Amino acid sequence: MSTNRLSGMLCLVLLMMLPSASSAGPNVLAAKVVAGCNGTQPTLTVLLNSTTYGFYKGSLYYHFDPPSPGSKPGTAGNPVVLEIPSSFAVNSEHRVQISTSSQSVGGSSSSEYDFLVPSCAEAAKG
């Protein structure tokens, strides 16, 4: 077999092994993102799109103010309730992004969803 033909076959095999757009997972989408309180702890409830949850389940990472590193929630489910970082001031605006990677680059990512940090001290009194 000639070297050119062998190289061509090797290239073809390598191309077949690479993921294609049709084999990629669905877009990462949230159906709803709502800030709230769990006692005095500000929380963010993320309801994933049913297709997103059906495909990725608990393998997603949540990034507050991307490009920060993401973290997985302690429990997998839909919706996911995340604790808003204590360093975020009450009534300040922030963003959350959902991705398939713990890093801010690589993998599939959702759009950024804006939220306002609630005042939970007042909610806990009421």
Image (tube, helix red, strand yellow):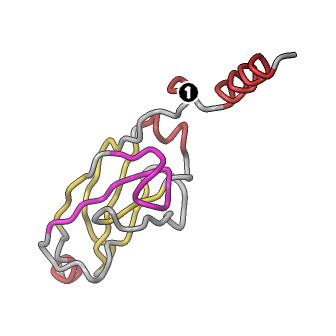
Position of residue 68 measured from the top left corner of the image (x, y, whole percent): 36, 67
Quadrant for the C terminus, please. Answer: bottom left
Instruction: Identify whether 52 is placed above or below 119.
Output: above
Quadrant for the N terminus, please. Answer: top right
* Residue 100 part of the magenta segment: yes
Q: Amino acid at mark 1?
A: Ser
Position of residue 64 measured from the top left corner of the image (x, y, whole percent): 32, 65
> 36 or 66: nearer the eye?
66
> 121 or 42: nearer the eye?
42
Instruction: Identify whether 25 is placed above or below 41.
Output: above
Identified at 28% across, 71% down, the residue is: 37
Instruction: Identify whether 81 is placed above or below 20.
Output: below
Highlighted magenta segment, given as a residue range: 93-110
Position of residue 121 measured from the top left corner of the image (x, y, whole percent): 20, 83
Identified at 33% across, 73% down, the residue is: 38
Quarter of the rendering containing residue 89: bottom left
Q: Which residue position is annotated with label 1?
A: 20
